[in-house]
Image: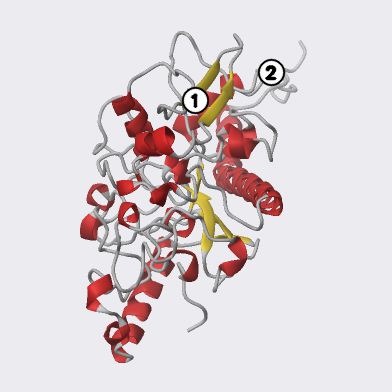
Amino acid sequence: MPTPKFNQLRSPGFTIVELLVVISIIALLIAILLPAIGKARDAARVTQSSANLRNLGIANDTYGADWGGRQFTSVPDDIGLVENADPVLYNSTVACMAQAVAGTDQNGDTWAAWCGGDLCPPYAGDPLAWSIFFHTIYQPISYNVPIYKFGGFRTPNGKAFNSYVGSRFYDPVFWAPKDTYALEAVEPFFDQASEFYLDPNDPKITWSSYVWSGAAMFNPEVHSHCGWRNPRSMPAAFRSPAAGQCRFPDLKTRMIEHHWLQNTETGFNPGFSEGDDPSWMFNQGYNSMPVTLFFDGHVAMVGVSDAMEGDTRAQTMAEANNSCNLCQASTAGECQTGLWSRDTQWGADGYYGEYSYDTLVNTSYHVLTTDGLFGRDVMGNK
């Protein structure tokens, strides 16, 4: 009778213990690699946004080459000739200003924020609507209707400027890769051949992820350190200064990511009305670091905390040097010692400051720069 064999080879396969070990190793590798992959993806998006701003910097320079070094503007230089810089009065007595055109859509229709008057063709609409368009889109910043806080500084993808990039309103160069809400709205239009595209099922316009410095587009006296002056009270307020007049080109921001895209800590801002873009603004989070184009052409990430620290240093220096004593009370409002003006019609909260994410942040740099193009948004080395 044969002796039983108790050492026969076992069937091929893994034991439960071995499977658990393999799964644990895979999970560990994923845990190690995912953050690295996320950081690499994040870095790639920052690199793309930086490339977009460099291209827009070239477009700004090309525009300047065609317009005597000037910055982009939608406002006639001489609109101050008429009382209160009234657009309808200007269009009825001086000339019909160039219209803020978005482009020609897929049906051949031209879309624009028409601003009319007696010397203009008979555009659809009424003078009140034309005037509102002027106040909210043509001016660098709308101070006449403060609730909108909009203006030409928000509109680089309009036809007058996008012709220096790709001649399309919805060109990818105008959107930052992390601007999720805006991208969801505009990505379907990137492949459209027309200059402008209006979705018949959702007829709305989405503006660029990048914005100019509104204060730098005005005459520097508007946001003077001696106090803000209403541009409609100044004959030369709307003549955009030449970029070459910038006194601190390596410290003055030119274009910036409009939304809080870097180091975000939350989803959407609950302070905005339903139907609006709910994204936080770049200056609403202390840890925000928007990718930024400066007037000297370099691109860098600028921390809101750095802008706030520079603002504090500027105030200390101005007070130590009694800078306000040089201002004439007859021509100025409240003296501004910091890097951004708290003296505009938007008050001490500045640009959407009342909706900020945390209590630490307090800045409206870039948008409300003191002395406009002559000022600076960050300080140099300590």
Q: What mark, if any, has residue 193 been given in the picture?
A: 2
For the N terminus, which image quadrant? top right
Q: In the picture provided, is 166 more to the left or to the right than 347?
A: right
Few, some or many residues within 10 Å of mark 1 (<14, 14–19, 20+): some
User: In the image, residue 86 lies at what x, y percent?
Assistant: 34, 41
Q: Quadrant of residue 327?
A: bottom left
Q: Nearer the viewer, residue 164 or 176?
A: 164
Residue that mark 1 sits on: 112
Q: Quadrant of residue 363?
A: bottom left
Q: In the picture provided, is 214 more to the left or to the right than 43?
A: left
- Tell me which label, 1 or 2, sits earlier in the chain: 1
Q: Nearer the viewer, residue 145 or 8?
A: 145
In the image, is residue 14 above or below residue 232? Answer: above
Q: What mark, if any, has residue 99 been given in the picture?
A: none
For the question of whether residue 136 can be seen, the reply is no
Few, some or many residues within 10 Å of mark 2 (<14, 14–19, 20+): few
Q: Marks 1 and 2, Cα distance to the nearest angstrom?
A: 19 Å
Instruction: Identify the amino acid type marked 1.
Output: Ala
Residue displayed at 37% across by 80% down = 313
Q: Residue furthest bottom?
A: 321
Q: Nearer the viewer, residue 300 or 26?
A: 300
In the image, is residue 374 above or below residue 60? Answer: below
